[in-house]
Amino acid sequence: ADAFRRFMERCAAGSVDDIQILYGLGGERRRWLNEWEIEWLEGYRGSRPVRVGNDAAAQAQHDTYGYLLDLAWRWARRGNVPDDDYWAFLVAAVNRAARIWREPDHGIWEVRSEPRHFVHSKAACWEALDHGARLAERSMSIFAMPAW
């Protein structure tokens, strides 16, 4: 979990606005994930088209922020404390979820049409806000000064 947390922060270059929903194994961004079809290859039980890559890399999927904050929450519950850079990254993710939850997206189903409203995406943004608030409360209690 910690390695994935660091991978995500590194792939986004610390900027929540640059998060995409998938990366190559080495953190490659969109240009390495372009989708193309293999015309001559038959898919599972004859299904077509057979695609390599995934055009969804460029899609907006708001559930990403819920997953990021859920990971951070579980990581913190195991006794880890975010450093300043990671904390700034998480705060930015929560703020972004708060800004975009009303906007349509492509959802976890990666619809190839115009973005739509998905309950799952809205719930995942709520999860980002909820876990972000819990992380803030937990961090305040860890660093709270004793009463004199």
Image: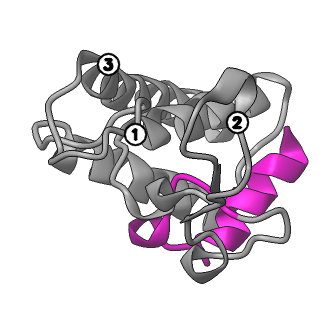
Give the label on residue 110, or none. 1
Q: Amino acid at mark 3?
A: Ala
Measured Cα–Cα span from mark 1 to mark 2: 19 Å
Task: Report the magenta residues as a range.
Answer: 1-23
Q: Which mark is residue 43?
A: 2
Q: Residue furthest right?
A: 3
Q: Are marks 1 and 3 in contact (CB under 8 Å)?
A: no
- Residue 18 seen in render: yes
Tell me whether circle 1 and circle 2 mark residues in contact (CB < 8 Å): no
Of 54 and 87, the residue lying toward us:
54
**At 74% across and 50% down in the image, what residue appears?**
41
Front-most of 127 and 111? 111
The quarter in which the C terminus is drawn is top right
Tell me which amino acid carries mark 2.
Answer: Gly
Find residue 9 and name its label.
none
Position of 74 with respect to 67 (left or right) is right
Image quadrant where residue 58 sits: bottom left
Q: Which residue lies most toward the front here? A: 40
